[in-house]
Image (cartoon, rainbow, N blue to C red):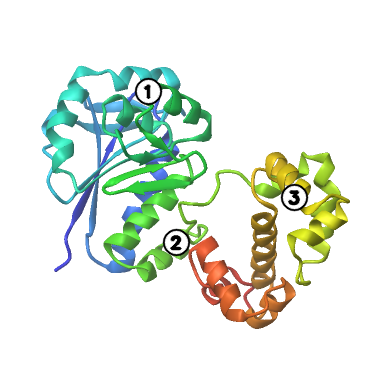
């Protein structure tokens, strides 16, 4: 028998509307695919009534004290304006409600700077957590007992879920949905919403290529790599092209770009593979074209990076005949 889970979004004055609308759209779309009310979405606030977002759009809400949490509920805190986050974090009514209700919930989570609200109320102690890149330094500084994941789209630790914010709230909601139902359902919902199928939580909040573009010392090597991805390149080849020893190149590249040369090369191969699949490339040919020696190895790497197989990605994003 399918259970109807409640998703309880906690909002406040000057909250980020996309942190609410993105994930709630994921859960709402599940009704269309599964054809059963598997999620019930609610917006809560300390005072209830209309709450103004940062965009000026107002959203109606129930009072916190009017909601008693049960074992199939998910509580999600949205992010928002810095001053608003500080105020809501210290609100005594919220603190009292959290103390009573969070132990009952199936899941507790946040989108964007909502992680700071959880941390301020002691709910992230000893847990892995992430937040928007602009708030990572504060999370590290003010809450030393939180295991801050500084380079993740979202993080899951037991029943605690946190995301980097804005669009990554969609990724986290899709991951929750996959856990509640199945990866197949999750992929169908992503397709229904016409969003990127699903980015695994361990992906970086930043693009390695974007970082490299600003590092003049490695501009030529990036261009050269993109022209030679079909070859069985190694880090030593990249070092030779840069006229450095392999050890020196590894150290300088990692410091400047923010990831190892081998990881950068893999990411470039997989990014090119996505482009080829989108334009009608056959999986086996694409595998060879981006330098993989076996189709199996390519499939495993692609799925680890993007959360779905190359063939499914092609069906969802490829050029229609």
Mark 2 to mark 1: distance in Å?
30 Å
- Under tag 2, what secondary structure? helix
Residue holding disc 2: 190
Q: Nearer the viewer, mark 3 or mark 1?
A: 3
- In the drawing, what numbered circle is on residue 247? 3
Q: What crowding class fits label 2: few (fewer than 14 Cα within 10 Å), some (14-19), or many (20 or more)?
A: many
Q: Position of residue 273 (x, y in %)?
A: 66, 68
> CA separation, marks 3 and 2?
42 Å
Measured as percent of width and height from the top left, residue 36 is found at 22, 65
> Which of 35 and 206 lies nearest the eye of the viewer?
206
Say how many tags the image has: 3
Residue 141 is marked as none
Quadrant in which the N terminus is drawn = bottom left
Q: Residue 85's mark?
A: 1
Relative side of 41 to 155, left or right: left
Pick the front one: 225 or 27:
225
């Amino acid at each position: 028998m399918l259970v109807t889970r409640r998703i309880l979004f906690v909002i406040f004055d000057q909250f980020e509307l996309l942190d609410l609308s993105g994930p709630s759209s994921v859960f709402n779309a599940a009704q269309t695919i599964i054809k059963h009310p598997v999620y019930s979405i609610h917006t809560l606030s300390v005072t209830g009534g209309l709450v103004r977002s940062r965009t000026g759009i107002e959203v109606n809400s129930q009072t916190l004290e009017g909601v008693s949490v049960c074992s199939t509920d998910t509580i999600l805190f949205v992010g928002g304006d810095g001053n608003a986050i500080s105020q809501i974090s210290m609100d005594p009514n919220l603190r009292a409600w959290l103390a009573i209700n969070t132990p009952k919930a199936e899941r507790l989570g946040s989108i964007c700077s909502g992680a700071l609200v959880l941390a301020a109320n002691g709910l992230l102690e000893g847990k892995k957590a992430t937040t928007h890149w602009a708030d990572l330094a504060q999370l590290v500084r003010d809450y030393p007992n939180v295991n801050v994941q500084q380079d993740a789209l979202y993080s899951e630790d037991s029943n605690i879920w946190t995301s980097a914010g804005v669009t990554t709230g969609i990724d986290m909601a899709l991951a929750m949905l996959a856990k509640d139902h199945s990866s197949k359902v999750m992929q169908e919902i992503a397709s229904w919403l016409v969003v990127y199928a699903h980015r695994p939580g361990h992906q970086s909040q930043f693009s390695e290529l974007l970082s490299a573009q600003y590092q003049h010392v490695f501009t030529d090597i990036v261009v050269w790599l993109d022209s030679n991805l079909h070859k069985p390149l190694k880090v030593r080849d990249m070092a030779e092209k840069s006229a450095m020893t392999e050890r020196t190149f590894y150290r300088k590249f990692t410091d400047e770009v923010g990831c190892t040369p081998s990881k950068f090369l893999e990411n470039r191969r997989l990014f090119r593979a996505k482009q080829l699949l989108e334009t009608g490339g056959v999986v086996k040919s694409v595998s060879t074209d981006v330098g993989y020696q076996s189709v199996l190895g390519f499939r495993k790497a692609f799925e680890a990076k993007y959360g779905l197989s190359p063939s499914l990605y092609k069906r969802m994003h490829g050029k229609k005949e």
